[in-house]
Image: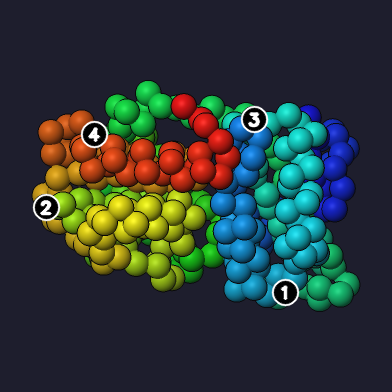
Amino acid sequence: MKVIWNNQIVERSEVKIDMEDRGYQFADGIYDVVRAYNGKFFTLNEHVDRLFSSAEKIELVMPFTKGELKQLLSALIKENGIDTGNIYMQLTRGIGIPRNHTYTDPELVPPVFTATTTIVPRDQEKMDQGMSAFIVPDMRWLRCDIKSISLLGNIMAKHEAHKKGGDEAILHRDGVVTECSSSNVWMIKDGTIYTHPDGNLVLPGITKIMLLKVARKAGMLVKEEAFTIEDLKEADEVFASSTTMEAMPIISIDGNPVGHGKRGAIVENLQQLYVDAVEEECGQIR
């Protein structure tokens, strides 16, 4: 399996990451995940833009242009023969010796970039059946808009949900729902679709952006507006969205059914609208 290491495509076995890499020692780095269908990227521009935005927010100098990165990623999925799958890319601030909490000088310490591919088919059965979730306090830091590799808070939240038999954790701050541990969260009440507005407390999800776009184009009523745990429990439908899950129904929360305890009509419609957008860019995926 080939990977990207800095600006080269190499065998995975050739990659050597120093033990004093700041990503390893401080989680001083960023990442993103983009999906391919039929060997073609979906929303590549948006994912690359978000990676560059995260880098800018932590003053991390990118080692290449957006165009150069896109060419590298395209070459990688072709090299590995990826049809439907994910491309994970990560950038750290590089090797800092001696270990120091302050930022390194980018002219002296180059960042380290890696990217890998994984074949991940669409799980249509799961998207039809939906998943369960449990509500967990949002104990993460206050810059969730940065796609940081520091994900311990997210991991701990999802683990709490998994210990109770859930698929995902729905996070809240003082009763206000923010997002899930690895996805954005939405609720539907009386035909209106709600999701938390972008800001420092939630990740600006690319799938979220696409779903907002297709929903509004279809004439659906959408509000980027915060809602509470109490609102969530009274919702007619709830779903999560991410690059890998697309639009995933949440059919139970804390062991209680959402609505009728199965995927609702509005979520099903949104799923189809999202598939239509993918197929317009990448070809038929049914």
C-alpha separation, residue under disc 3 versus residue under disc 4: 28 Å
Q: Which residue is mark 3?
A: 83
* First-in-chain label (3 vs 4): 3
Q: Nearer the viewer, residue 98 or 175?
A: 175
Mark 3 vs mark 2, CA separation in Å: 39 Å
Disc assigned to residue 190: 2
Instruction: Estimate the spatial distance between the alpha carbons at disc 4 and disc 2, rounded to whole Å.
Output: 15 Å
Compare marks 4 and 1 and give the one earlier in the sequence: 1
* Residue 114 picture location, percent across and down: 75, 48
Residue 102 position in % (x across, y down):
71, 75
Asked if labels 2 and 1 touch by Cβ distance under 8 angstroms, the answer is: no
- Can see residue 271? yes
Q: Pointer 1: what residue? A: 103
How busy is the neighbourhood of tag 2: few (under 14 within 10 Å), some, or many (20 plus)?
few
Quadrant in the picture for the N terminus: top right
Amino acid tagged 2: Asp
Q: Which residue does the image show at 37% across and 27% down from the upper left?
A: 126
